[in-house]
Amino acid sequence: MVRVALAEAGGLGMTILRAIVDNKKHDVVLLSRGPKPDLSAKGIDVRAVDNNNHEFIVNVLRGVTSQLALLAAAKEVGAKPFAPSEFAGMKSLPLAGINLYRAKVPVWEATKASGLKYTNFAPGLFMNAFVIGTPRGQQEALEWHRPYNFIVNVKLGNAGIPGDGNKKLTLTTMGDTAKFVTAALDLEKWEEEMGVVGENVTFIEIVAIAKKVTKRRFLVRYKNIEETDERGPSS
């Protein structure tokens, strides 16, 4: 059994929390910015923390095998293994030039330099980001993903595709990612990067699926990478 410290449960964090609890093999401590009475009522150990109070976080983490916690405190208590809240692509890929991922680079570099055992969970893009505007089952398909339009706007029937749209990208649902993270808790060794793949598709193929599901035409505009980076993924 592993004792897991999970930092804040919003979106993916909530999905991972549910997966660990449903697995019934590991204990989980939720480090939250505030009380979570609904989760506490279900027997989940919720501990309110101030991210600026290093000493308090250290005391909470002491004796806990940490997952998605705060690096400095985790290093002080020797928590291991450690997984920063990255959940994007492989760090061997050139993500630093994309605004969406630029802030992740120094976190990853600090993690590598920490001396802790660590990994980067890499599911690619969350498939859930493409479900806004779907004719039915939208809330279920979102899981805990924050609703926003990414590249393809199903509701309005348009898409701003970076490049020519023919490059394969990895999509994985948040639910499958959470199950993968939970299963990894049973591994004796974590690799530096651990990828999970739901499906490899192109943006053109995603648009084709959206057309088929919605039974409507889509206005597609192709943009260069710099334009996508400046205006954001859903512009």
Image: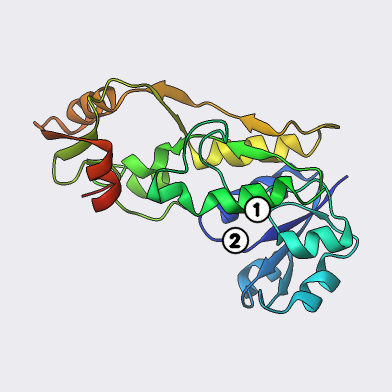
Residue 162 locus on image (x, y percent)? 25, 34
Could you tell whether 125 is left or right of 160 in the image? right
- Image point (69%, 76%), residue name: 48
| Viewer-nearest residue: 208 or 233 | 233
- Image point (47%, 43%), residue name: 96
Per the image, label 1 sits on a secondary structure element best described as: helix
Relative to 6, does residue 132 appear above or below in the rendering?
above
Mark sitting on residue 17: 1
Amino acid tagged 2: Ala
- Image point (59%, 54%), residue name: 13
Per the image, label 2 sits on a secondary structure element best described as: loop
Q: How is the image coloured?
A: rainbow
Residue 84 locus on image (x, y percent)? 65, 50
Mark sitting on residue 139: none
Could you tell whether 108 is left or right of 198 in the image? right
Residue 58 visible, this orientation: yes
Relative to 49, does residue 171 appear above or below in the rendering?
above
Residue 209 locus on image (x, y percent)? 25, 26
Please give the count of numbered marks on the rendered protein: 2
The residue identified by callout 2 is 9
Amino acid tagged 1: Leu
- The mark nearer the N terminus, 2 or 1, is 2
Mark 2–mark 1 distance (CA, rounded to whole Å): 7 Å
| Viewer-nearest residue: 61 or 226 | 226
Residue 232 visible, this orientation: no
Quarter of the N terminus within the rendering = top right
Residue 64 locus on image (x, y percent)? 85, 58
- Image point (65%, 53%), residue name: 17
Do callouts 2 and 1 mark residues in contact (Cβ within 8 Å)?
yes
